[in-house]
Structures are given as structure tokens and as C-alpha cells.
Amino acid sequence: MTVKRPGPFSMALILLAPVVASALFVVWARVTTVRLGYELSRSESALRTLERKRADLERAVTTFRAPERLRQIGSEELGLVPPSAEAVDELAEARP
């Protein structure tokens, strides 16, 4: 029984296949790394934008809750006035 030896083309294919597979893996890994880098950069940019928006909203809430602003709205827009001392005393006496 004789064993047929592979021809030069088959031998070259057998020797080059691992090299080509390794090169393809390296290229895939680099492309994936670059893609993930861009994705990370976009995510960090979105995070910074959201953090700025949150800070702006926190400042707005602080402004809207400011006692001076609430007093101004109450007196100018709603016509509210501070209670008299007698009204406060009556309310304190009415509490159990």
C-alpha cells in the first residue's frame, strides 16, 4: 500500500492556512478594538452631555424652590399676604 504525498499546491495550502487564519484573527481583533473605542467615546460624550443637563436641571430646581422667588410669586401673582400675628396665634391655639 502506497501513501500518496500531497502536491506542492496542497502543501502550500497546509502551511499557509494557519498563517492566514492568524492574520485574519489579528485584523478582526484590531477592527473590533477600534469599533469599541469609537463606541466608548460616543458613550462618554453622551454621559458628559447628560451630566451637564442634570446640573442645569438641579440649578433650575434650586432656583424654583428659592424662598425669595416663592414669596415673590405668592405676593405678586397670587395676591397672598403674610398672616397677621393674631391669625397665627388662633391657629396655634386651635391645634390639639
Image (cartoon, rainbow, N blue to C red):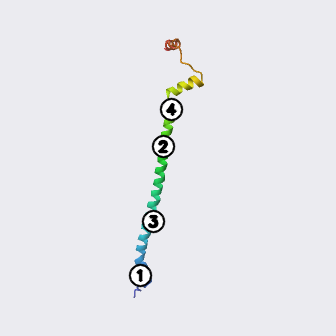
Q: Which badge, 1 or 3, is on the more N-terminal residue?
A: 1
| Mark pair 2, 3: CA separation | 36 Å
Return the residue nearer the eye: 64 or 26: 64
- Answer yes or no: do the residues labelled 3 and 4 have beta carbons within 8 Å? no
SS category of the residue bearing label 2: helix
| Mark pair 3, 4: CA separation | 52 Å
Q: Which badge, 1 or 4, is on the more N-terminal residue?
A: 1
Q: Which residue is mark 4?
A: 63
Q: Which badge, 4 or 2, is on the more N-terminal residue?
A: 2
Q: Which residue is mark 2?
A: 52
Q: Tell me if mark 4 has few (under 14), some (14-19) or many (20+) residues whose alpha carbon lies within 10 angstroms of its own.
A: few
SS category of the residue bearing label 4: helix
Q: Tell me if mark 1 has few (under 14), some (14-19) or many (20+) residues whose alpha carbon lies within 10 angstroms of its own.
A: few
Residue furthest bottom in the image? 1
Q: Which residue is mark 1?
A: 11
Q: Which badge, 1 or 2, is on the more N-terminal residue?
A: 1
| Mark pair 1, 3: CA separation | 26 Å
Residue 29 x %, y % = 43, 64
